[in-house]
Image (spheres, helix red, strand yellow):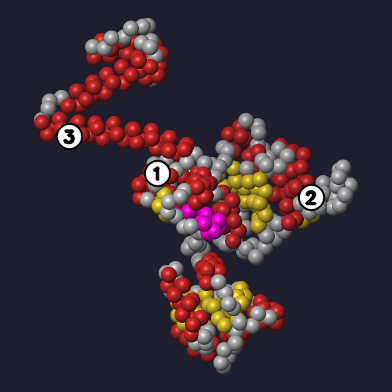
Amino acid sequence: MKPVWIIDDDRSIRWVLEKALARENIEFRSFSSADEAVQALAHGAPQAAISDIRMPGSSGLDLLQTLREQYPHLPVIIMTAYSDLESAVSSFQGGAFEYLPKPFDVVHAIDLIRRALEQSQRRSASAGEVLAAPDILGQAPAMQEVFRAIGRLAQSHATVLINGESGTGKELVALALHRHSPRAEKTFVAINTAAIPKDLLESELFGHERGAFTGATAARRGRFEQAEGGTLFLDEIGDMPAELQTRLLRVLSDGSFYRVGGHQPVKANVRIIAATHQNLEERVKQGLFREDLFHRLNVIRLRLPPLRERREDIPLLAKYFLQKSARELGAEQKSFSEATLQYLMAQDFPGNVRQLENLCHWLTVMTPSRVVEAADLPPEWRAAQSASAMAGEWRNALAQQAALALQRGDPHILDTLTKQFESTLITQALQHTGGRRIEAATLLGMGRNTLTRKIQELGLDGEKE
């Protein structure tokens, strides 16, 4: 990535920004005047720039104009000690990314620079190199496939169907598809079709005319009109009522719709991205989802992997969410111990990324120590940890016993240890059931006759049938 340019005649301001950027590992280059920066353009442009307005020679607004002419998508942050309306208006009219009055908070300034860098990278990324949005993190092969798909779809208007379990980040992927599309400057509108009552969903999607029903005292634009020229994200599409499936199919087919109570068609220039955690093919077979609508939506399908299929991403996500929670709550920054990260990687996370984020939010608020240990996890997680630890203990004991037997050169090690293992399991199962063999066999997952034979072979006593 190219450096951030700092342009200010005040040496102390340059020093403060240089130190802050260095702490964030952001490459930078400093100039004491706009004229110096313009000369440096002959050797290449920055990734982003932050410039004072009033300096000897050319002003920051002059520099802004030059940069806009040569590099129209280069984000420029304008800062000035003269916090007047005219400077702010001139900055934005000149195409500034943001306006930063002095004195400024360094954390805020760095946040603006990061946002400028993100925009610059999104603008300059090629179709195959699209960067993930901050919350879409992942190095696992399955996530890299998702990122590549977003890149390939960057210039497309095609309808996309996203499949994934709850909490995997389907809306974030939809938003990334929008941000990297030709519709990025228009509106992204999201609606969860399962969260809105059936009798309100039609009006919510398509709007209504005044007097269309009791309480409709004024005309209202629906989500389709709100997303005009942009993207409409329909989450949990599998739960859409049958009659609305018909109306949605008509919009996808004809490109127009009617407001509730309306008689004039409204054109819909909207890209549809739908998502579901359900198996739509199965829903079609059950008669719960229209087959023709399914084929209309299923132009391009993306599958989001559950977190248990990308365990290597858990440390990356956990660290990010812990930082994000601290920033949002204004709390002390915490970190995970390596043992805690290893423990989290072993969990299945049925709630996926959302569950991990909620856990990090809880830890930010509730954990007193700066380093999060496994003992700091919520009670329900500690219970799982206890069971996991116990399972680990017997495996370690078995490994030690096997190692000793191998060192001694004992014969028939596998047969001996297997008999000890089976004997322990059967004895515990019979104690648990009060000696009832049928119940014990069911719990162990074997037939009653098999259990009886093993009791005899192992010399165990079963008391009850």
Which amino acid is tagged 1? Ala
Q: Residues within 10 Å of mark 1 (few under 14, many from 20)?
A: some
Residue that numbered label 2 is attached to: 207
The circle on residue 374 is: 1
- State the count of labels: 3
For the N terminus, give its image quadrant: bottom left
Q: Is residue 286 above or below residue 126?
A: above
Identified at 67% across, 42% down, the residue is 195
**Bounds of the magenta span?**
319-331
Q: Indicate the quadrant where residue 464 lies.
A: top left
Residue that numbered label 3 is attached to: 403
Q: Is residue 131 above or below residue 462?
A: below
Task: Verify whether residue 324 appears in magenta.
Answer: yes
Query: Mark 2 and mark 1: span between their CA atoms?
Result: 50 Å
Q: Indicate the quadrant where residue 421 lies.
A: top left
Query: What is the x, y in percent for residue 438?
Result: 39, 11
Which amino acid is tagged 3? Ala
Going from N to C along the chain, the mark reached first, 2 or 3, is 2
Query: Mark 1 and mark 3: span between their CA atoms?
Result: 29 Å
